[in-house]
Amino acid sequence: MIKSLYWKNSCLYILNQKILPRRIKYLPCRKYEEVAECIREMVIRGAPAIGIAAAFGIVLAGKEKKFSNSKFLNQYIRKACNDLKKTRPTAVNLFWAIERMQEKLKSLSKETGNIGYIQKRLEEEAKRILAEDIEMNKKIGAYGAKLLKKNSVVITHCNAGALATGGYGTAIGVITSGWKSGKIKMVYVDETRPYLQGARLTALELKQQGIPYRLICDNMAGHIMKTEKVSAVIVGADRISKNGDTANKIGTYSLAVLAKYHNVKFYVAAPGSTIDRKISSGSEIPVEERAEKEVTTIFDRLIVPKGTRACHPAFDVTPSKLISAIITEKGIFKYPYSF
Ligand code: MRU
């Protein structure tokens, strides 16, 4: 599986997902602002992946200047954290990872004023966040595969695979584990307008693994559910409130409604870092609004009459009642949800 990012010699290499699947190119980031720009512009995307990138961004912030004492280091990292938090609002993993790094810095600063030591320990913490993410995804995959029946035909939306995480993926992790245990017959991949994460990224990941798939336009899902004996929809998540309401890529809610009507299971796969214990329902989840031009253009070409306005909510919120199960690294949760 292609890596969304890797760390080498104090440099974070971020895979440019905007040019996939045509080209595989890693962008070297040596400053936290470069990481912030990659997150903002969706060079890297996917809830866990942007959290991990931000954690390494904080490591870079702690190294990119010559700090005369740990007070200046702390000040600069605080600025970096604030800037990184402003990049994308919906995926809580971003805030979770930044807060975890801030906590680490706080406890290190109480312990010592040795800058080299603090830098080293922050780097270890970011590496731990990455390693733990992969481990959690493998567990999610194993739990999720248990829910699947033999010869399952599934639909997935957006990309919740290795590219959206530290590795292995959440929804795609479930599909991969299901495939390995002989339970997946076919995966229908929503193209996922406007960014085409399904067409460009999920299709690539499934192709690389030899998992059978067919690409569908987002508006084909209902017809496919009616005609192709779909057994489950499996998606990832960007933020889950305490009651199980789930924000994920725009179009997820429509799929959940369709799944209910067609009696198709609707599964959400996500690590604990996606659960926002500070909010009790989905109405509190901030939905990112992105630029209209991302809808009115495809690969920078205008596809509408000049001057056409567009809406671009990048996420929607699926009420927990419509979710058959939420699969986390801790196991399988069912309605009524409590985490
Ligand atoms: O806008 P994106 O591409 O960052 O949105 C990604 C999604 O909605 C994913 O489904 C979600 O982050 C889960 S990734 C494991």
Image: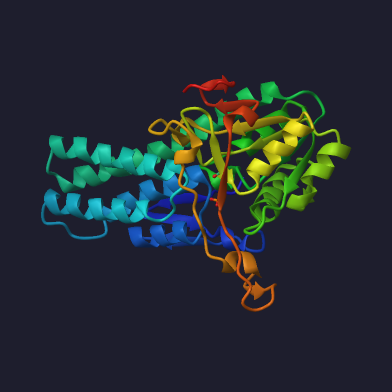
Q: Is residue 216 left or right of residue 266?
A: right
Which residue shows up at 35% across the image and 61% down it?
A: 33
Which residue shows up at 68% across the image and 43% down it?
A: 254
Where is residue 188 shown, x and y percent of the image? Answer: 77, 43
Q: Is residue 69 left or right of residue 132?
A: left
Image vertical order of residue 225 relative to residue 35, above or below: above
Assign the N terminus to one quadrant of the image. Answer: top right
Outermost residue to the right: 227
Where is residue 142 shown, x and y percent of the image? Answer: 62, 25
Identify the colour scheme used.
rainbow
Image vertical order of residue 278 relative to residue 83, above or below: above
Outermost residue to the bottom: 306
Q: Nearer the viewer, residue 108 or 239?
A: 239
Where is residue 218 shown, x and y percent of the image? Answer: 73, 51
Which residue shows up at 64% across the image and 69% down it?
A: 296
Q: Quadrant of residue 17?
A: bottom right
Q: Nearer the viewer, residue 24 or 110?
A: 110
Judge whether residue 124 can be spotted in this image. no
For the image, the number of numbered tags is: 0
Image vertical order of residue 263 relative to residue 51, above or below: above
Where is residue 14 shown, x and y percent of the image? Answer: 48, 56
Which residue shows up at 56% across the image and 54% down it?
A: 313
Q: Is residue 241 left or right of residue 216?
A: left
Judge whether residue 194 can be spotted in this image. yes
